């Protein structure tokens, strides 16, 4: 598979593409004219027909999510771009937040038009201060050019947009926690029902979509659902930005069609394993997705194929570990993250992640006990299906998958009283 | 009781105008107050709560929920080194030890001269250029111990 022609990142390196005039000169905001001609119902149909699925990690069909909101007769409706990009190893949305912001704004306007939303927010993670400045400047420009505000480009459609800046909390990337945070409360999940399509932000019908999902919308409208849907895998089509990291020769962002194989991603685009080492493990879709092994290299990066392999595509953030990595150490570090980010509301997640950090640290540091592996599995099974939000579920995946594929590594740590690579789990606070 | 500056108050009102409920501007207000005072001490949080119209307990709860609101004094430069998965794979833990030695403090502490605070942070979305760190609002990528030494001496 060669490098595909870029769609989403086409203009990412154009100088001053954050300036609205430069963006328009490169074909920007064209999809608005087409969408306004088509009418909201036809835009919704087109997005449904394209097969666009949410690229934040859950891969829910975007058109269906919109439809639920369209059906509710309550106004105003809200559209929120989830720019909280917090899943570890995910950095795919940054180009749209820091370099090419109008692409996101354009996608949001078209999407809001289809949904019937008159108010929008970009929920931006606190860790991206540049994005905060760039997005605010781009929004100001868009207002001046009447791409935002009242009667956009003379159409019978008005849309207001603002940035809401987070302050460092992974859980706020979960849609209902995000809305709580938008409302000035601690970002903790809401128990559904009621669903956000009827009772979202400020009690009004709300759609929350990932940045990359929204960015795709103008391309679907410009090029048509048939063209867009013909790219990549049938069950989850379209272009996708894969962020590959870890022990690679060429880590970075690659825009590729859905369905590229892990082998292609790692060896063709990523240039293979760093320093000519052997591949040990790969996390295909962000830290909360199950680890895979070299046996899985021919699996396609799409929703169905990774699910069948017992993992998930998640955000498409693929992290590669060479034989130099200690799997136990990495699982401990992942668990330290989940423990730190657990909101504390569900006991199994709050206590379970704490317990697992302690167990994993003692295994790594030479005080592991034979029964520890059984305890880890028990804790995972206690968290699974017993928590309200996906954070705890995500914490379980690295543990269970590594115990499945790399159990001998854990056993060796316990037997030899320490990490064969000489690593230690640091005390953290 | 602390008084917020005119500037900060204006910024808070600008933020509040973006929402149907001014409670939503609490996060923006905390950011603005942190920019003014360098940290969110209990009395600063209380002042923010009053302006927004929430209880100080509510504002305190929000401030302590988020890792980027400083609840204690920090140095002129806050060195935030990412040690999440991608950065750790690329050697971030060795760099953390290097920083601790170089600055003569432990992670989470501030140098006695008030110049540097060292913090370990979760993923900062720089995984393609790991290891990475942020100092105040500037990102530094593909770090090595030598690179860090250069960056720190440039700031001193």
Image (cartoon, rainbow, N blue to C red):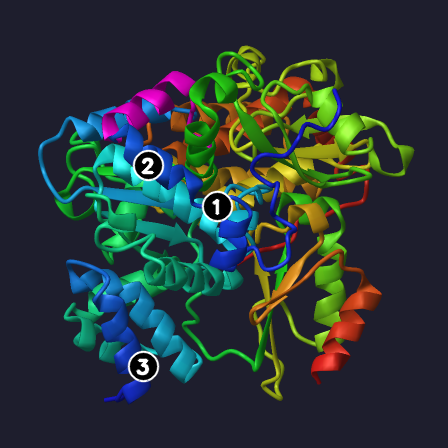
Q: Is residue A102 above or below residue A314?
A: below
Q: Is residue A147 above or below residue A3?
A: below
Task: Find residue A63 and report its image quarter.
Answer: top left
- Badge 3 crowding class, 10 Å Cα cut-off, few under 14, some 14 to 19, many 20 or more, is many
Range shown magenta: A40-58
Task: Find residue A126 and report its image quarter.
Answer: bottom left
Residue identified by numbered label 3: B8
- Number of the label disc, if any, that sits on residue A323: none
Q: Is residue A220 magenta?
A: no
Q: Residue at x 46, y 39 (%)?
A: A215
- Is B91 on the left or on the right of B109, as rendered? right
Question: To which chain does the residue with label 2 belong?
Answer: A
Residue identified by numbered label 1: A28
Residue nearest the observer in this picture, A232 or A169: A232
Q: Whole-percent x and y of residue A408?
A: 73, 22
Q: Is residue A360 visible?
A: yes
Q: Whole-percent x and y of residue A409?
A: 73, 27
């Amino acid at each position: 598979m060669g490098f595909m022609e870029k769609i989403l990142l086409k203009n990412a390196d154009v100088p001053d593409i954050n300036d609205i005039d430069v963006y328009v000169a490169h074909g920007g905001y064209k999809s608005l004219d087409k969408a306004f001609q088509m009418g909201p119902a036809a835009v919704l149909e087109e997005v449904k027909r394209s097969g666009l699925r949410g690229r934040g990690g859950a891969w829910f069909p975007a058109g269906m999510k919109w439809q639920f909101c369209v059906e509710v007769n309550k106004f105003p409706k809200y559209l929120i771009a989830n720019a909280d990009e917090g899943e570890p190893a995910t950095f795919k949305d940054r180009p749209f937040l820091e370099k090419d912001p109008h692409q996101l704004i354009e996608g949001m306007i078209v999407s809001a038009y289809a949904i019937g939303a008159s108010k929008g927010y970009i929920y931006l993670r606190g860790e991206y201060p540049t994005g905060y400045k760039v997005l605010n400047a781009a929004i100001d420009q868009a207002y001046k050019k009447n791409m935002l505000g009242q009667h956009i480009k003379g159409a019978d459609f008005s849309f207001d947009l603002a940035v809401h800046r987070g302050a460092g909390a992974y859980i706020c990337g979960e849609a209902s926690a995000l809305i709580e945070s938008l409302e000035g409360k601690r970002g903790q999940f809401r128990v559904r029902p009621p669903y956000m399509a009827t009772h979202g932000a400020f009690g009004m019908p709300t759609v929350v979509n990932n940045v990359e999902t929204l960015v795709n919308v103008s391309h679907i409208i410009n090029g048509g659902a048939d063209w867009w849907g013909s790219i990549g895998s049938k069950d989850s089509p379209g272009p996708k930005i894969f962020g590959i990291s870890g022990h690679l020769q060429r880590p970075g962002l690659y825009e590729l069609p859905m369905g590229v194989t892990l082998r292609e991603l790692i060896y063709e685009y990523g240039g293979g394993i760093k320093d000519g080492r052997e591949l040990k493990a790969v996390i295909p879709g962000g830290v909360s997705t199950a680890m895979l092994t070299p046996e899985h290299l021919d699996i396609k990066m799409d929703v169905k194929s990774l699910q069948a392999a017992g993992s998930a595509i998640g955000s498409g953030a693929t992290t590669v570990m060479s034989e130099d990595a200690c799997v136990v150490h990495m699982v401990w570090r992942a668990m330290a993250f989940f423990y730190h980010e657990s909101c504390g509301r569900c006991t199994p997640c709050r206590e379970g992640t704490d317990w697992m950090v302690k167990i994993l640290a003692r295994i790594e540091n030479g005080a592991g006990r034979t029964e520890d592996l059984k305890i880890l599995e028990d804790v995972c099974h206690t968290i699974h299906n017993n928590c309200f939000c996906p954070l705890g579920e995500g914490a379980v995946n690295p543990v269970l998958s590594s115990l499945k594929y790399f159990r001998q590594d854990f056993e060796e740590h316990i037997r030899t009283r320490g990490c064969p690579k000489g690593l230690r789990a640091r005390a953290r606070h | 009781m602390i008084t917020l500056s005119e500037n900060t108050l204006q910024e808070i009102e600008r933020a509040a105008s973006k929402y149907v409920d001014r409670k939503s501007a609490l996060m923006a207000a905390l950011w603005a107050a942190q920019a003014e005072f360098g940290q969110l001490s209990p009395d600063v949080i209380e002042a923010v709560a009053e302006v927004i119209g929430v209880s100080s307990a509510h504002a305190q709860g929000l401030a302590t929920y988020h890792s980027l609101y400083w609840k204690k004094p920090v140095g002129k430069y806050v060195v935030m080194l990412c040690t999440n998965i991608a950065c750790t794979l690329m050697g971030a833990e060795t760099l953390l030890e290097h920083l601790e030695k170089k600055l003569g403090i432990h992670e989470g502490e501030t140098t006695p001269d008030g110049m540097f605070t060292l913090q370990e942070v979760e993923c900062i979305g720089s995984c393609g250029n790991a290891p990475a760190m942020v100092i105040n609002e500037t990102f530094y990528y593909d770090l090595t111990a030598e690179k860090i030494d250069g960056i720190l001496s440039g700031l001193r």
